[in-house]
């Protein structure tokens, strides 16, 4: 059973920055695409970003493009999301999600999810 | 690509047959998946490639469709099935989810 563990959420002021992390103890993530999906309180799911297994293979939702950066460190078996210029509308539970595989279409199907980390943006 | 789910909510009884639809704004072949999300929990993959049951998911769940119209069916609703269901397209970036269908107890 794959367990994804997110960390790094918290309270940040508008315009501030935060870095989320996601790791999977006992499971090697390097062969799989990884994504971030968020859910604002009481709302539906919103895809944020995906990083593939090949360098430079990154994708972003329009609402975060230019402000968020997804990356992975396979040596640390960790996924990151650097969030800059945070806005009130970025407040949500952020889930990391593992693709079923490393290439399309499996990479875009999320078979394991973390428990989520809450990001609150408020002054 | 926009995904429109209907209904947005429904009330049903244990044992009922439940059908949820997801319509894509353009053709996506069979690149559609379904998730179940219970309150306060992360989503759980039910079906991928429109109709393939994820390992460990009960056989009362089934999916069908291709192109623009898709369906998730629960053949006999069980107490543990009361949750919110989401479709997601993986045909192209940006990946998108439907608005969700909340299945409640009648």
Image (spheres, grey):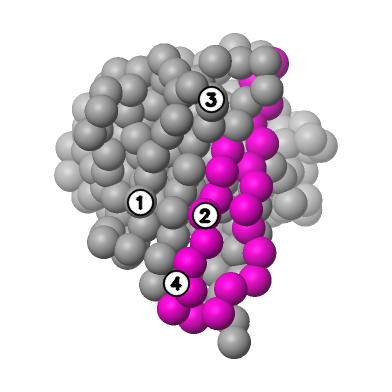
Q: Earlier in the sequence, mark 3 or mark 4?
A: 3
| Contact, mark 3 vs mark 4 (Cβ under 8 Å) | no
Question: Circle 2 sits in a helix, a strand or a loop, which is it?
Answer: strand
Residue B56 percent location from the top left of the image? 66, 14
Question: Residue under circle 3?
Answer: A77
Mark 2 crowdedness (10 Å alpha carbons): few <14, some 14-19, many ≥20? some
Question: Residue under circle 1?
Answer: A69
Which of the labelled discs sits on residue A86, or is there none? 4
Q: Quadrant of the C terminus of chain A?
A: bottom right
| Contact, mark 1 vs mark 4 (Cβ under 8 Å) | no
Q: Earlier in the sequence, mark 1 or mark 4?
A: 1
Q: CA distance from mark 2 to mark 3?
A: 16 Å
Of tags 2 and 4, the one toward the viewer is: 2
Taking the spot 68% from the left edge, 22% from the top edge, the residue there is A25
Q: Earlier in the sequence, mark 2 or mark 3?
A: 2
Q: CA distance from mark 2 to mark 4?
A: 11 Å
Which of the labelled discs sits on residue B99, or is there none? none
Work out whether disc 2 and disc 3 sit on a shared chain. yes
Residue A63 percent location from the top left of the image? 32, 64
Q: Is residue A41 above or below residue B15?
A: below
Q: CA distance from mark 1 to mark 4?
A: 12 Å
| Contact, mark 2 vs mark 3 (Cβ under 8 Å) | no
Q: Earlier in the sequence, mark 3 or mark 1?
A: 1
Mark 3 crowdedness (10 Å alpha carbons): few <14, some 14-19, many ≥20? some
Question: Circle 3 sits in a helix, a strand or a loop, which is it?
Answer: loop
Question: Residue under circle 2?
Answer: A19
Q: CA distance from mark 3 to mark 4?
A: 26 Å
The chain to which mark 2 is attached is A
Quarter of the figure with residue B43 = top right
Lateral position of residue B86 relative to residue A8, left or right: left
Mark 1 crowdedness (10 Å alpha carbons): few <14, some 14-19, many ≥20? some
The chain to which mark 1 is attached is A
């Amino acid at each position: 059973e794959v367990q994804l563990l997110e960390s790094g959420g918290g309270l940040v002021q508008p315009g501030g920055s935060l870095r989320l992390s996601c790791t999977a103890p006992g499971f090697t993530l390097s062969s799989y695409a990884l994504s971030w999906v968020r859910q604002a309180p009481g709302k539906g799911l919103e895809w944020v970003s995906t990083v593939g297994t090949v360098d430079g293979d990154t994708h972003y939702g329009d609402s975060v493009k230019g402000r968020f950066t997804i990356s992975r460190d396979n040596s640390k078996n960790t996924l990151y999301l650097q969030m800059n210029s945070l806005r009130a509308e970025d407040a949500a539970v952020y889930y990391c999600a593992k693709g079923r595989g490393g290439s399309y279409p499996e990479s875009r199907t999320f078979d394991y999810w973390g428990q989520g980390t809450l990001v609150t943006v408020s002054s | 690509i926009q995904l429109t789910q209907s209904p947005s909510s429904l009330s049903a009884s244990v044992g009922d047959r439940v059908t949820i639809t997801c319509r894509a704004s353009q053709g996506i072949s069979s690149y559609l998946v379904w998730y179940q999300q219970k309150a306060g929990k992360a989503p759980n993959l039910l079906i991928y490639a429109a109709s393939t049951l994820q390992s460990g998911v009960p056989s009362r769940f089934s999916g069908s469709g291709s192109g623009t119209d898709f369906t998730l069916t629960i053949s006999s609703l069980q107490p543990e099935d009361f949750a919110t269901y989401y479709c997601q397209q993986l045909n192209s970036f940006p990946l998108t989810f439907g608005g969700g269908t909340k299945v409640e107890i009648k």
